[in-house]
């Protein structure tokens, strides 16, 4: 039984008890506990079920490497799955549920998989579920779906908020153990801006647990002193609960800070994602202990030796009354010593090495602990809880020489440097034969923008083990004159690699040796993968699932690849590791999103008239990041009815349009005319001041990219209107050509889109409305079609353009944005007696489609040239060059088979489906029906009372009157006749009045 | 003329830093050759300040000039003073290749102030906003979350932020979010 | 996540303040050019493992286009320079030579 010891626990405050629930049961822990230590203290060693076989599992580690103790935490809008109990700090009211079991943790139906284990070997999903084919849909897939995935997905919108923070430092030290502290002090002495981050809530790492002395004082005190000294430094910043998540190119580092996770509250950021630019990154991330591969090494009660000692020393929790220690290195003796000193029994230390000698071994022996060398665990006894171990010679097939009764096993397979952050950005590793581990290759560090190394690994992360060695390694980055911290050197026996225990274990034992606890991958699975030809470690990973999921193989990778290399008969460095990818441990999606959520998910652009629209029934449509009224709903009105009313009212009386989103770009200079001649397909340099001209813009591929009206302001100055979506990128397009190709041309541009509110006054009564507002002559004589004039309306300075996108008499009035609303109100007021109503984007579309005006993005899709749209009249034949001209001469562009623009009218008056294809005889090479055209715009025309459409059809303009079949979404077809795309007022009499 | 109405007139938020939308201000874009004597003289006589050096902003009496790019300046002045300044500059530059245009209504301005004001900015921009990089007289054009913006100091612990008018609400909202009381970082 | 010095502003600009613009030093082929030349201009691009020249725009800053000489393998930046040139400037080529002797890119070395 796991329990709280009567004394000890350097991190807990026994004076402050906290209540929490686990699977609905109320339990008590202490301030300073992790969820894992609190559960163990409550005797709750069973913490979850394994993924594949649903085997009962307990916690095996004490830090972020934990693969088993994953929890659903919280509820409702604060529910979060797959949280490690070992890194979850206890707080009052915490709710935790174990995962991956049904109906309950203690009694789980899925455990039958355990007994069917021989049917679920490595790669089972590639093999087992293939035949019979028909079973896939009804049997296999539902089964896999039900069992797939860890934890439950949250159902509610996250109640919390998150934020980012950008920092720029000279040196970032990742890891707050004694190596990180030493490195930070060294870096601080160098004078630059230094930041030191530590993933846990505590400084010092393992040293305080292992009770080393540094500079003549206890490690605990040394850590405290070091932090105090660093806090004194102006140029040092310290953050706990802040994990180095990823190291990226050019010194970019993501760090993940947990702010209120341990004390949830409304209205404050829960996580903060640090985006750090560091000139130098020091990786002081320590090392992770490896499990040993012996049969039954996943039975609850088996734990990493370092973790056993952490629970005892940090949280005053014992894993059991009698703990057998099994090891291949000296460090595990610390556990035997710590447990004995805490008054617990250690019936034996099983050391796989032949005759190790060292200070710790001697100390253990001196305490009367029985040490058996050359021995290991043949198998663990007990199913849901350790009841003992069967002992064997390590150099044997597992013949049992003795059984020892115990309720806990502390194992240590040696320590692996945490090289993840070193490796993220390209740092290479070397195999350290003596340490039996991969460690950073100092010759092959990640390099930054200058080409120089920007990451340094220090301490245990660099393969240094033992306090004295760690301190010296971290101090090597210090400038001269900084005092080095000192600890007594240790005499230790070398670690001896043990990848399987015992060495000659047969299949039965190997199929109970877990490598990856989270994904249920055993020694036998990796060996099977090797036999089946998976020689690459990356392939073996995918095939067996070794090292996948939330822990990414922190415990299993090295053991797994050692087994693989043994099976392949290749050396470990030749097999290599899988790729280390960020983040180091999982981080919340909320932290990645930061401010990009809810109202600020994306910038929402508003015109100066936004408020009026909102107050007058606007039914919004997103147009890029803009919000534009699709239509304005009157009381009880449907969207369709509103659009119909707005179209009719504009045709018959007068409509008001907020056209502020259209781009307005000024081009000025002696070469402005020449420049616009290159940008537009038509001739702009011949435009007279005071006049307007419609123009088309193509890219160098010849494809139509934008259109709009250009107004010539004076000899040197043009104002170019773009589409709503075009303002920014057309301005950028202009600047790109001016800056990178024609930089000697004298032209300046300015994007004035947001300087103005632009108001369309459209319809037969438009002139009367403006005359009532008063202030300038808007008569046909003073302001004919396709001209503009500056003036005043209602006392407000305006520029009025007589241009039309509806076929009606139309004025577009530009007014400074700060006066936009005032002018709109004046016009709306004056328009009342003429029946003026606002209209939205859908009415705008219907009005233009009735007139056969193209719309960029409807008639064009990035593959359409102006010639396809019958716009040859807008392409200058005189110009030697314009952007796109050469491309439009390519064979494919002049092919007579290209589809061309026509109008389409259904025989039954219905509206053609959007995007519908005109079918043709026969089938193509893929067995699909041949096609001969497609619909690009389609609407119900309130003016004409039937459906109208435009489309691109092969030889379309030559086939007037022909009837085509268009497919419908229900599988049927509908007949439509090819007609002129201009459905309304073909002579243009209405706009030119 | 009617009363000018800026995008978010009067909006404010009191967090650990104060965020205020500012009333209309005159802004004039000047593009031209900074090396030319004509442009230097024109700016000096119309605004009373010299052309600033790369990346900097110079302040006058009720006016300021910011360097926006190697051929673009922004003149700040009172909203009502714009026509006079535009005409003055245009006349002085009539014989030069230059562009002078009023952009006062195209942008929104915010004032962000308070002891930890740099932290509000550092939550939103990848630019270095430490005192060493963004001290008095520096104007940094960058992005705030997802939109372009300009930032410069106007006092001991106060910055002004300039963005496009259409995203004024967005910028106000993200500044507000970054200044939530209790979310101080304690970094600078 | 790159960080490049804008040669106009002088500031270190984060990749998210920049917009990439593909390969630098393209020569435009206009009307009258051969199909092969035009195809090369429109579609053919270097894909080097090593030294490369590319275009960037300081879009969330001064708005100007500049060029960067960069190693596509290590992301080492040899230099950035204004876009108003038709070929890599001498000092940039020398900077590359000092780090990558014997480099070549298109017709340059």
Image: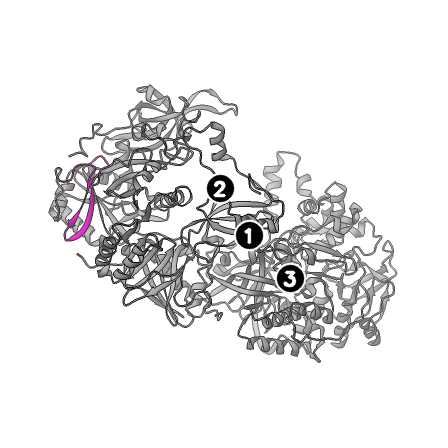
Q: Which residue is mark 2?
A: C25
Residue designated by label 1: C77
Percent coordinates x, y for residue A196 in the rendering? 58, 68
Callout 2 crowding tier (Cα within 10 Å): few <14, some 14–19, many ≥20: some
- Mark 1 belongs to which subunit? C
**Can residue A764 be seen in this snapshot?**
yes
Looking at the rendering, the stretch of residues picked out in magenta corresponds to A782-807
Q: Judging from the image, what secondary structure is the residue with disc 1 in?
A: strand
From the viewer's side, name the closer residue of A206 and A781.
A781
Report whether B178 appears left or right of A272: left
Alpha-carbon span between mark 1 and mark 3:
21 Å
Left or right, A401 with respect to B133, comes to right
Do the numbered discs 1 and 3 sit on residues whose CB atoms are within 8 Å? no
Whether residue A640 can be seen here? no
- Asked which secondary structure carries label 3, the reply is strand
Give yes or no for contact between labels 1 and 2 (Cβ–Cβ under 8 Å).
no
Quadrant housing the C terminus of chain A = top left
Label 3 neighbourhood size at 10 Å, few (<14), some (14-19), many (20+)?
A: many
Earlier-in-chain disc, 1 versus 2: 2
Q: Nearer the viewer, mark 3 or mark 2?
A: 2
Element under label 2? loop
- The residue located at (55%, 77%) in the rendering is A232
Per the image, is A798 magenta? yes
Name the residue furthest front. B37
As rendered, which of B95 and A513 lies closer to the eye? B95
Was residue C105 drawn as part of the magenta stretch in this picture?
Answer: no
Report in which chain the residue with disc 3 lies: A
* Residue A258 on image: x %, y %: 53, 65
- State the residue position of label 3: A456
Residue A947 appears in which quarter of the rendering?
top left
Query: In 3D space, how far apart are the residues under numbered discs 3 and 2 (Cα atoms)?
Result: 37 Å
């Amino acid at each position: 039984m796991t329990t709280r010891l009567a004394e000890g626990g350097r991190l807990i405050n026994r004076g402050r008890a906290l209540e929490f629930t686990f699977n609905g049961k109320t339990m008590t822990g202490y301030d300073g506990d992790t969820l894992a230590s609190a559960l163990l203290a409550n005797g709750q060693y069973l913490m979850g079920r394994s993924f594949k076989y649903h085997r009962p599992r307990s916690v095996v580690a004490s830090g972020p490497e934990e693969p088993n103790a994953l929890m659903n935490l919280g509820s409702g809008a604060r529910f979060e799955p797959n949280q490690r109990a070992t890194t979850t700090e206890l707080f009052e009211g915490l709710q935790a549920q174990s995962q991956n079991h049904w109906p309950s943790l203690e009694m789980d139906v899925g455990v039958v998989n355990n007994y069917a284990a021989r049917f679920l070997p490595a790669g089972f999903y590639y093999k087992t579920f293939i035949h019979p084919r028909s079973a896939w849909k009804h049997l296999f897939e539902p089964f896999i779906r039900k069992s797939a995935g860890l934890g439950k997905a949250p159902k509610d919108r996250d109640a919390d908020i998150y934020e980012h923070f950008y920092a720029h430092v000279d040196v970032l030290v990742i890891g707050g153990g004694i190596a990180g502290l030493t490195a930070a002090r060294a870096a601080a002495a160098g004078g630059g801006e230094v930041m030191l981050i530590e993933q846990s809530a505590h400084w010092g790492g393992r040293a305080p647990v292992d009770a080393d002395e540094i500079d003549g004082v206890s490690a605990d005190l040394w850590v405290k002193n070091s932090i105090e000294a660093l806090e004194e430094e102006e140029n040092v910043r310290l953050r706990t609960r802040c994990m180095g998540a990823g190291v990226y190119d050019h010194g970019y580092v993501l760090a993940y800070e947990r702010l209120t996770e341990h004390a949830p509250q409304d209205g404050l950021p829960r996580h903060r994602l640090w985006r750090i630019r560091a000139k130098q990154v020091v990786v002081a991330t320590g090392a992770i202990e490896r499990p040993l591969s012996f049969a039954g090494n996943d039975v609850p009660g088996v734990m990493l030796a370092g973790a056993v000692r952490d629970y005892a020393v940090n949280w005053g929790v014992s894993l059991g009354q009698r703990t057998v220690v099994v090891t291949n290195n000296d460090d595990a003796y610390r556990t035997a010593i710590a447990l004995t000193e805490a008054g617990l029994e250690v019936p034996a230390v099983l050391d796989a090495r032949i005759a190790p000698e060292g200070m710790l071994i001697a100390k253990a022996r001196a305490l009367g602990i029985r040490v058996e060398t050359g021995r290991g665990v043949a198998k663990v006894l007990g199913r849901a809880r350790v009841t003992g171990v069967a002992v064997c010679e390590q150099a044997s097939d597992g013949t049992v020489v003795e059984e020892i009764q115990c309720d806990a096993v502390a194992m240590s397979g040696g320590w692996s440097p945490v090289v993840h952050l070193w490796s993220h950005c390209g740092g290479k590793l070397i195999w350290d034969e003596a340490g039996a581990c991969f460690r950073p290759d100092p010759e092959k560090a990640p390099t930054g923008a200058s080409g120089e190394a920007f990451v340094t690994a220090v301490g245990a992360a660099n393969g240094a083990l033992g306090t004295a060695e760690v301190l010296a390694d971290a101090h090597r980055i210090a400038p001269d004159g900084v005092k080095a911290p000192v600890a007594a050197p240790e005499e230790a026996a070398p670690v001896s690699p043990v990848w399987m225990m015992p060495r000659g274990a047969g299949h039965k034992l190997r199929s109970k040796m877990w490598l990856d606890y989270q994904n249920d991958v055993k020694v036998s699975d990796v060996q099977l993968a090797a036999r089946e030809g998976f020689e690459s470690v990356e392939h073996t990973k995918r095939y067996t699932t070794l090292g996948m999921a939330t822990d990414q193989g922190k415990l299993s990778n090295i053991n797994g690849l050692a087994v693989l290399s043994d099976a392949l008969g290749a050396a470990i460095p030749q097999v290599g590791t899988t790729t280390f990818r960020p983040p180091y441990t999982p981080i919340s999606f909320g932290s990645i999103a930061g401010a990009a959520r809810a109202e600020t998910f994306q910038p929402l652009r508003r015109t100066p008239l936004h408020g009026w629209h909102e107050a007058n029934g606007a039914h919004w449509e997103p147009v890029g990041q803009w919000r534009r009224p699709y239509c304005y709903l009157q009381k009880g009105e449907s969207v369709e009815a509103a659009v119909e009313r707005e179209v009719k009212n504009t045709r018959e009386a007068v409509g008001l349009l907020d056209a502020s989103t259209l781009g307005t770009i000024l081009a000025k200079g002696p070469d402005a005319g020449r420049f616009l001649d290159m940008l537009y397909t038509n001739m702009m340099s011949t435009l007279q001041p005071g006049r307007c001209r419609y123009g088309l813009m193509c890219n160098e591929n010849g494809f139509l990219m934008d259109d709009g009206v250009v107004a010539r302001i004076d000899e040197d100055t043009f104002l170019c209107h773009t589409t709503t979506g075009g303002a920014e990128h057309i301005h950028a397009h202009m600047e790109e050509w001016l800056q990178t190709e024609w930089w000697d041309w004298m032209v300046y541009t300015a994007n004035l889109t947001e300087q103005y509110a632009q108001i369309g006054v459209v319809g037969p009564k438009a002139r009367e409305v403006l005359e009532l507002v008063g202030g300038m002559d808007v008569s046909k004589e003073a302001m004919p079609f396709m001209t503009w004039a500056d003036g005043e309306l209602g006392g407000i300075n305006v520029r009025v353009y007589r241009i039309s996108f509806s076929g009606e008499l139309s004025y577009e009035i530009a007014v400074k944005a700060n006066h936009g609303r005032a002018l709109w109100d004046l016009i709306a007021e004056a328009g009342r007696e003429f029946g003026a109503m606002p209209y939205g984007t859908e009415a705008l579309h219907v009005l233009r489609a009735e007139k056969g005006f193209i719309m960029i993005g409807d008639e064009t899709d990035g593959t359409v040239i102006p010639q396809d749209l019958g716009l040859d009249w807008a392409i200058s034949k005189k110009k030697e060059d314009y952007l796109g001209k050469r491309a439009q001469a390519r064979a494919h562009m002049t092919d007579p088979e290209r589809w061309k623009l026509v109008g389409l009218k259904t025989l039954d008056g219905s509206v053609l489906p959007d995007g519908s294809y005109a079918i043709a005889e026969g089938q193509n090479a893929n067995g699909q029906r041949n096609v001969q055209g497609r619909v690009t715009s389609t609407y119900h025309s309130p003016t004409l009372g039937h459906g109208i459409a435009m489309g691109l059809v092969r030889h379309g303009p030559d086939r007037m009157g022909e009837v085509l079949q268009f497919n419908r979404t229900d599988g049927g077809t509908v007949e439509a006749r090819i007609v002129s795309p201009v459905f309304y007022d073909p002579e243009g009499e209405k706009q030119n009045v | 003329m009617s009363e000018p109405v800026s995008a978010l007139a009067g909006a404010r938020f009191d967090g650990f830093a104060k965020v205020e939308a500012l009333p209309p201000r005159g802004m004039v874009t000047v593009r031209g050759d900074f090396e030319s004597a004509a442009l230097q003289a024109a700016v000096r006589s119309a605004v009373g300040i010299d052309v600033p050096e790369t990346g900097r902003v110079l302040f006058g009496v009720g006016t300021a000039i910011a360097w926006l790019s190697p051929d673009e300046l922004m003149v700040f002045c009172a909203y009502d003073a714009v026509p006079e300044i535009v005409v003055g500059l245009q006349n002085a530059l009539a014989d030069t290749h230059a562009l002078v245009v009023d952009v006062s209504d195209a942008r929104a301005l915010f004032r962000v102030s308070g002891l930890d004001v740099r932290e509000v900015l550092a939550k939103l921009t990848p630019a270095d906003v430490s005192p060493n990089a963004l001290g008095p007289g520096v104007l940094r054009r960058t992005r705030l979350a997802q939109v372009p913006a300009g930032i410069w100091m106007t006092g001991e612990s106060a910055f002004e932020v300039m963005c496009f008018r259409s995203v004024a609400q967005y910028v106000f909202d993200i500044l507000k979010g970054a200044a939530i009381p209790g979310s101080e970082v304690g970094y600078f | 996540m790159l960080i490049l010095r804008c040669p106009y502003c002088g500031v270190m600009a984060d990749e998210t303040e920049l917009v990439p613009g593909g390969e630098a030093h393209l020569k435009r082929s206009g009307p009258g050019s051969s199909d092969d030349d035009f195809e090369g201009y429109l579609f053919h691009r270097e894909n080097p493992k090593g030294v490369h020249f590319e275009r960037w725009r300081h879009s969330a800053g001064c708005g100007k286009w500049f060029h960067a000489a960069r190693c596509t393998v290590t992301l080492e930046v040899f230099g950035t320079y204004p876009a108003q040139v038709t070929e890599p400037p001498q000092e940039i080529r020398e900077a590359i030579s000092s780090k990558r002797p014997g480099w070549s890119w298109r017709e340059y070395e």
